[in-house]
Amino acid sequence: MTELVDAPADVKAIRHWIGGKETPGGSGRSGAVYNPATGVQSGSVDFASVEEIDAAVQAAKAAAPSWRALSLSRRAELFFSIRQLFHEHHKDLARLLTLEHGKVLSDAMGEVARGLEVIEFCCGIPTLLKGGFSEQASTGIDVYSIRQPLGVVAGITPFNFPAMVPMWMWAPALACGNTFVLKPSEKDPSASMLTAELLAEAGVPAGVFNVVHGDKVAVDALIEHPDVSALSFVGSTPIAKYVYENATARGKRCQALGGAKNHMIVLPDADIDMAADAAVSAAYGSAGERCMAVSMVVAVAGVGDKLVAAIQDRIPKVKIGNGLDESSEMGPLVTREHRDKVASYVERAPGEGATVVVDGRASCPDGDGFFLGPSLIDDITPGMDNYRDEIFGPVLGVTRVETYDEAVKLINDNPYGNGTAIFTRDGGVARQFQFDVQAGMVGINVPIPVPVAYYSFGGWKASLFGDRHIYGPEGIDFYTRTKVVTSRWPDPATSKVDLGFPQTR
């Protein structure tokens, strides 16, 4: 992590948002924010101290009683206002994503749209929080359940979806009556600050939503804080495991979503053009920096040569450039260091025995931006780094097997289980695949099977630590706890209160 003492005078200062207002950092530590398309520093983000994390948590704690007491009808009304404001500022949020993450505007607009779906889902919170009721469970006794919020909850979010993933967390958390502290990625923090401003404009009370920036100091302070009841995290598997183990050791609820190595099986009967189009969009969209990206194509039987040729033919047509240029289809990677790390996998591939079909290092635009073109690597086997590691960039690998069973075994043997896909015209095989495969999200002729907002998002195995997926029904479960009430009232026939009607049994 690069820390700056004195940032250039012309860069934007990015502060915290605590207790309903922008709050300058006092730790003396900060991080550089870059425009990945130019390589130029555009911002300096304050890094929070332990004391500043505590200030945000205390603001959330102070706001919690009145926020929890707000009626469901008023909270739903407020969420309709939130949804309208975010819709009106859709382009403003998307532009911030392009400027700090680098993704092209079309990807950025899509990101905000998917986040908006979760806000829209939360507009139905009165229905989502309904409990159950059993009359006369025993003579004169009724039993019912109610859902109640946890209190102060926190979210730690990644650089690759700086608007959408926070929406996956704060929207259901607030709708359920919790207050929230967000620690976004320090690489692209401005979308979170605009989020805070829009929530305040919509009428969310001060302290209900807070933003603190930083590094491991901030993460550990949230994990360790006694007033934080639950943590949601999305990031790499090693950090997800660290967050989960340390949070749960302190008695907190935790959902920690980790990394992925998503396989796309292509069977001999598949529509090759459809599969090739899907592989290109799923592998190289958003420069491959997404946990649902397809990173491995599994070519079954004799389909490999035709499929690789079709993908190779499409790669030169992917226009790489500044995300603000509407003609660009793929932007830069988020940092220079990450770009160089991704490129190293292409460089090492021949030494491992793989075949570099397309070398993305040869198609980078001129300039100082953090660009890397799409790469295609064939003949990858499970023992290679290109197979084992989550590369998180525009590198698509191809491995070849002879049978459907071998293809499924590759997926099921992989430590990750986030998402997977199969391309086939055979409905029976597709149904068998969804039964056989060990992954949390499955696409059938759909390369990136991200669930709609009224389902839930999450993987299996090392892609998720915890027992609840994010957003959707499981998100409501995560941000509430159930209370069961057993009640008995005096028999009206023996009551001394005049009820105004005959007291019969």
Image (cartoon, rainbow, N blue to C red):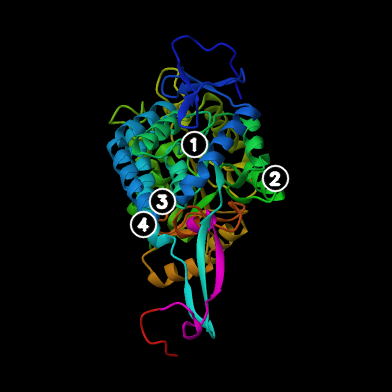
Please indicate whether residue 93 sits to the left or right of residue 165 in the image.
Answer: left
Disc nearest the viewer among 3 and 2: 2
Inspect the image, locate mark 2, and give the three-letter code of the amino acid beneath it: Asn
Q: Please tell me the numbered disc located at residue 246.
A: 2
* CB contact under 8 Å: marks 3 and 4: no
Give the structural element (helix, strand or loop) at label 2: helix
Q: Position of residue 420 (x, y in %)?
A: 48, 56
Q: Give the mark nearer the N terminus: 3 vs 2.
A: 2
Q: Is residue 168 above or below residue 130?
A: above
* CB contact under 8 Å: marks 2 and 4: no
Give the residue pinned by disc 4. 124
Inspect the image, locate mark 1, and give the three-letter code of the amino acid beneath it: Gly
Q: Give the mark nearer the N terminus: 3 vs 1.
A: 1
* CB contact under 8 Å: marks 4 and 1: no
Q: Give the mark nearer the N terminus: 2 vs 1.
A: 1
Give the residue pinned by disc 3. 307
Q: Which residue occupies 36% across, 80% down?
A: 500
Q: Give the mark nearer the N terminus: 4 vs 1.
A: 4
Q: 434 or 117, which lies in front?
A: 117
Q: Is residue 473 above or below residue 182?
A: below
Q: Please tell me the numbered disc located at residue 207.
A: 1
